[in-house]
Amino acid sequence: MTFPVVGMVGGGQLARMTHEAGIPLGIRFRILSDTPQDSAAQVVSDVTVGDYRDLDTLRAFARGCDVVTFDHEHVPVEHLRALQAEGVTVRPGPDALVHAQDKGVMRARLAQIGAPCPRNRIVADAADVTRFAAEGAGYPVVLKTVRGGYDGKGVWFARSEADAADAFKAGVPVLAEERVDFVRELAANVVRSPHGQAVAYPVAESVQVDGVCDTVIAPAPNLPEELSAQAQRLALTVASELGVVGHLAVELFETRGPDGTPGILVNELAMRPHNSGHWSMDGAATSQFANHLRAVLDLPLGDPRPRARWTVMANVLGGDYPDMYAGYLHCMARDPGLKIHMYGKDVKPGRKVGHVTTYGDDLADVRERARHAADYLRGTIDE
Ligand code: ADP
């Protein structure tokens, strides 16, 4: 049998949806999951349950895999270097992945390649944050632990030196950034293969609520053509300069200069399929998951172009109702064009348990349909 085995570290919804994309291609898919109940572990047949921080576990998992890739960026890079030295193909490799693991390393490298970023530097303690504030626009200052944050955890908006002290409690180095007065958040998603082939998805708008992605609109409405091309070029440059293989999400802030000139600044990098690209499952000719698989296998990449004028993805967050299935009847009857993706996760307030996608020609209608379905499934509306 010549069909390759792709091993993905992590058992979350990204692994679940990557598995789904590999089925029509006949790709054999294996995951390393924390528990047998994780989202992907429920549906993938070849599951290793174990700790991705343990090198021997990773070694045993990688044996027999043609390539190892990731649903999260937390595997220690020294372990990945050890696997590579033993002949395992790791994509993206540790030299790229470290930029998605450590915001300090990421900022330093982006400065080297001339990518526009908010003013930033590593700060030693709360008094140093005050010095950083004095060097620029003053408080508030955004503080981020360089490692371990996600969905806004590990990010503080410090209004004073006393506030700033909180960020140092974890004992992890802290990066200070100027607070960007952005117009909105964008995501430039690209996929790059070892051959150096790369594709760029339309730049999307990502709407965050309480630090969590809530809605994604592709393409970003009213984005000037020039800025969109600039964002795509920037993401492609980051992918090639950092040697990324697979999907790269470049989270961006759209800004306006004092004279109203639009601009972009890089917020974050993710080197795996990303929430801002979920719309592509239903809204693009080739989804981010299919293209991630093609890239890590060094196959030619698929067409990233949208299938409809507008695609809107709304995350379904856990609410007060534990039974999301109860909402299917109403949502499906109301909107036959609705696409529902649930992750098999227990409902907990605020947790991402699924997403819905709608597409069409009328943006207001497409948005309303996605919003309605996400809210109805969550239980915040009942009609
Ligand atoms: P995480 O790694 O948890 O996703 P991010 O660095 O993406 O953290 O920050 C989470 C959110 O905080 C961003 O989506 C944005 O809304 C806000 N944010 C982050 N950095 C800044 C900044 N420098 N200025 C203004 N807002 C910011």
Image (cartoon, helix red, strand yellow):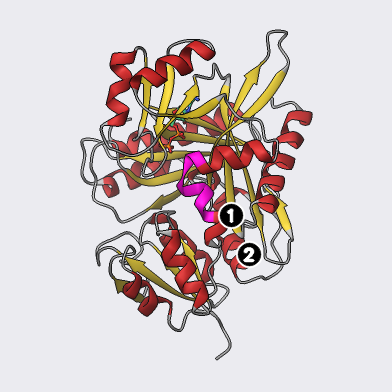
Residue 99 forms part of the magenta stretch: yes
- Quarter of the image holding residue 170? top left
The answer to whether any part of residue 371 appears in the image is yes
* First of labels 2, 1 by sequence position: 1
At 61% from the left and 60% from the top, the residue drawn is 245
Residue 36: horizontal and vertical position, in percent? 25, 67
Which span of residues is magenta-colored?
Answer: 97-104
Give the spatial CA distance, label 2 vs label 1. 8 Å
Amino acid residing under circle 2:
Ala
Write the residue at 70% across / 53% down: 240
The local crowd at label 2, few if under 14, some if 14 to 19, many if 20 or more residues have their Cα within 10 Å, is many
Q: Residues within 10 Å of mark 1 (few under 14, many from 20)?
A: many
Circle 1: residue type: His
Query: Magenta segment, principal secondary structure?
Result: helix
Residue 355: percent from left, percent from top = 42, 45
**In the rendered view, would you say 261 is above or below 225?**
above
What numbered label is drawn on residue 247? 1
Please state if 106 lies on the left or on the right of 193 as rendered. Answer: left
Q: Which residue is mark 2?
A: 295
Query: In the rendering, at what x and y percent does residue 187 appear?
Result: 59, 38
Q: Are marks 2 and 1 in contact (CB under 8 Å)?
A: yes
Q: Is residue 170 above or below residue 256?
A: below
| Element under disc 1 | strand
